[in-house]
Amino acid sequence: MEQRRVRVRFAPSPTGPLHIGGVRTALYNYLFARQNGGDMILRIEDTDSQRFVPGAEDYINESLAWLGIGIDEGVREGGAYGPYKQSERRDIYRKHVKDLLDAGKAYIAFDTPAELEKARAEKPNFQYDASTRLQMRNSLAMPREEVDRLIAEGTPYVVRFLIEPGRDVKVNDLIRGEVSISSSILDDKVLYKSADDLPTYHLANIVDDHLMEVSHVIRGEEWLPSAPLHVLLYEAFGWQDTMPQFVHLPLLLKPDGKGKLSKRDGDRLGFPVFPLEWHDPKSGDISSGFRERGYLPQALVNFLALLGWNPGDDTEIMSMDDLIAKFSFAHCSKSGARFAFEKGKWFNHEYILNTPGKDLVPMFYPYLEAAGVKADAFSQDYIADVLDLVKSRAELLPDLWGQADFFFIAPEAYAEKDVKKRWKPETPELMNGLIKLLETLPDLSPATAEPVVMQWIANNGLHTGNVMNAFRLALVGRCTGPHIFEITQLLGSDETIRRVRRAVAEIKVPEA
């Protein structure tokens, strides 16, 4: 038997921002497709017209593009299996609804919301199934003439799938093995609603997966209960031979406590749960995103890949190509994965550390502009050298500015606690002596300046800490930062001496 081409789909609903759990699902689909030389489909499931949110589809596309999750077929990319937006596939769904009705595998139901609510109130644990369907208002319990009349009058109706009880439905899952569920616990799911002429998730997904020749359905664990229904629908259409392989991924869990990761957890603990910042068009609320918080997309991808999967060894830092080469469902966990956001920061630090300063420059420009610094006042080489010097101290991109600000804006104020500790009555005289020494040097690089300054301190019987901490305070405005002669090398002789002179003039010796 010829092996099927691997074709996977990520099928989000445009009902709001893309949750980080959805991002991981998209990532695993992408890794599996690329590893097997297959296709990655982006299908927009917009059949729930009541929950549609303007801008959500663009947000999904931008998020995936930022993360480097490439799409082969979709609304933007096109493809031979379109349309890729479910609201544009109405004619296709109508035909398949009719096929099920004609085959007696589905039926029409006219129950109103009030009638369904009444049934639920009268019967505990009410379920629309073989035990109740003949007591309801549907084509199985009503004369054909009445059904035809109600349809002709435009009475709203739904089409329900006819599920026969007493059968064990088996689902083969690549992570969980064989899962068996009794059809007796399944209700007759709604497949189509006449009110908006659109199918529900259950019908649309089965039809689209079949027609788009999807080979593997990789989705979150929360969809596992719907898998038996999808198996039954494939059988009802006679598509058993093209049924995809199911893969249900473990949930992303709260960092603490029990339950699925939610936006509230992020708000409570101070981390985003969306890839990009989201502006809610209805409420006006703004939700933070990983990009705007200062995460590199490669770091976020690496972090997410290891939430529920491992490469089979202790390797942690992996590029997208590494992940594609190593990915395997055999190493996916069945149990949920805690969203350890502090570990995410560690990944980001590692990626910043291993990114050349020249590549960080474009990401740094917004922080310069936010501080009122004109980027073109400094050469790209200078900015890159600064970033290479400070990046080891940064977890997130904004940290780069916090570590490097003094390279672009000379201090106009000095940290009070450092002044109190490091600026003594004799300090101005020491700094003036240091200025005279620096003026004699050809440059202030570590190789040139450091041995000369250290020898000067020794020859004059000075305390190294007293001199160097005051020197740092004059250059930086606080007693933090990289090696001081790496600072002076970048600032240059003129700017270094100017800053020391200003500190001598501006800093007042604290009263004892």
Image: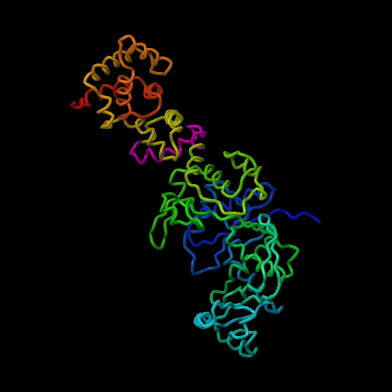
Q: Is residue 18 left or right of residue 189?
A: left
In the rendered image, the residue lying farthest to the left is 511
Q: Quadrant of residue 249?
A: bottom right
In the rendered image, the residue lying farthest to the top is 459
Q: How many marks?
A: 0
Query: Colour mode?
Result: rainbow
Viewer-proximal residue among 343 and 95: 343
**On screen, residue 382 above or below 79:** above
The x, y position of residue 130, in whole percent, is 65, 80
Q: Which residues are magenta?
A: 351-373
Quadrant in the picture for the C terminus: top left
Viewer-proximal residue among 478 and 10: 478
Viewer-proximal residue among 422 and 273: 422
Question: Does the magenta segment cover residue 215?
Answer: no
Q: Is residue 210 left or right of residue 64?
A: right
Quadrant in the picture for the N terminus: bottom right
The x, y position of residue 232, in whole percent, is 69, 69
**On screen, residue 298 above or below 218:** above
The x, y position of residue 40, in whole percent, is 63, 53
Seen at 30% across and 14% down, the residue is 462
Q: Main secondary structure of the magenta part?
A: helix
The x, y position of residue 169, in whole percent, is 70, 68
Question: Does the magenta segment cover residue 368?
Answer: yes
**On screen, residue 28 above or below 135:** above
Seen at 65% across and 58% down, the residue is 217
Seen at 67% across and 61% down, the residue is 212
